[in-house]
Amino acid sequence: MNKRETGSRFEEIAADYLQHAGYEILERNYRDRSGEIDLIAKDGSYYVFVEVKYRENANMGDPAEAVDARKQLKIRNTARRYLYRNRLGESVPCRFDVVAILGQEIRLISDAF
């Protein structure tokens, strides 16, 4: 599998995991000129912008560590544009979660940044 196919496979696994946890998936691979958000979901009244990171093993470190400050900024900017485009005001509660998949282990980091 190439990187895109691998990413899509694990984004699907993450979406299923989140749905079982009660999230409603609204968008997959949302893109605009600011960047991309892997999953956009609702968890209760919260809009949740989810970054999915996968590592086959720990040799490259924990997958969550790959969501560095630069990546967080891109996700925040893209989320801001999503809210604007969908006419959702600044008072709409939202948060940023990370789904870190290491081998077979799936870890949800709620309100990660």
Image (spheres, grey):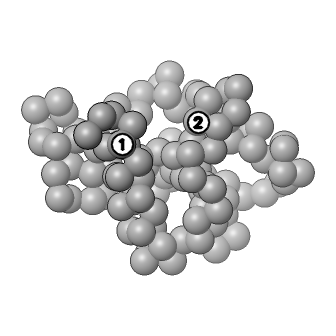
Q: What is the C-alpha distance between the residues marked 1 and 2?
A: 16 Å
Nearest to the eye among marks 1 and 2: give it: 1
- Residue for point 47% across, 45% down: 51
Q: Is residue 73 above or below residue 88?
A: above
Q: Residue furthest front?
A: 1
**Residue under numbered circle 1:** 5
Which mark is on residue 27?
none
Q: Mark 1 is on which residue type?
A: Glu
Secondary structure, mark 2, is: strand
User: Quick one: SS at disc 1?
Assistant: helix
Which circle's residue, 1 or 2, is located before the other in the chain? Answer: 1
Q: Which picture quadrant has residue 14?
A: bottom left
- Classify 10 Å Cα crowding around label 1: few (below 14), some (14-19), many (20 and above): few
The image quarter in which residue 30 lies: top right
Image vertical order of residue 63 relative to residue 92, above or below: above
- Residue at position x 16%, y 51% in the image: 103
**What residue appears at the point 72 percent right and 58 percent down from the top-left corner?**
93
The residue closer to the viewer here, 68 or 35, is 35
Q: Which residue is mark 2?
A: 36
Image quadrant in which you'd find residue 74: top right
Does the rendering let one see residue 57? yes
> Is 24 displayed left or right of 8 in the figure?
right
Q: Position of residue 88 (x, y in %)?
A: 84, 53
Residue 109 picture location, percent across and down: 39, 54
Whether residue 112 is visible, yes or no, is: no
User: How many numbered discs sit on the rendered protein?
Assistant: 2
Query: Does 62 appear above or below 70?
Result: below
In the image, residue 14 sits, relative to residue 37, either above or below, namely below
Percent x, y for residue 110? Answer: 46, 57
Amino acid at the residue labelled 2? Glu
Quadrant the N terminus occupies: top left
> Is 113 or 6 nearer to us in this picture?
6
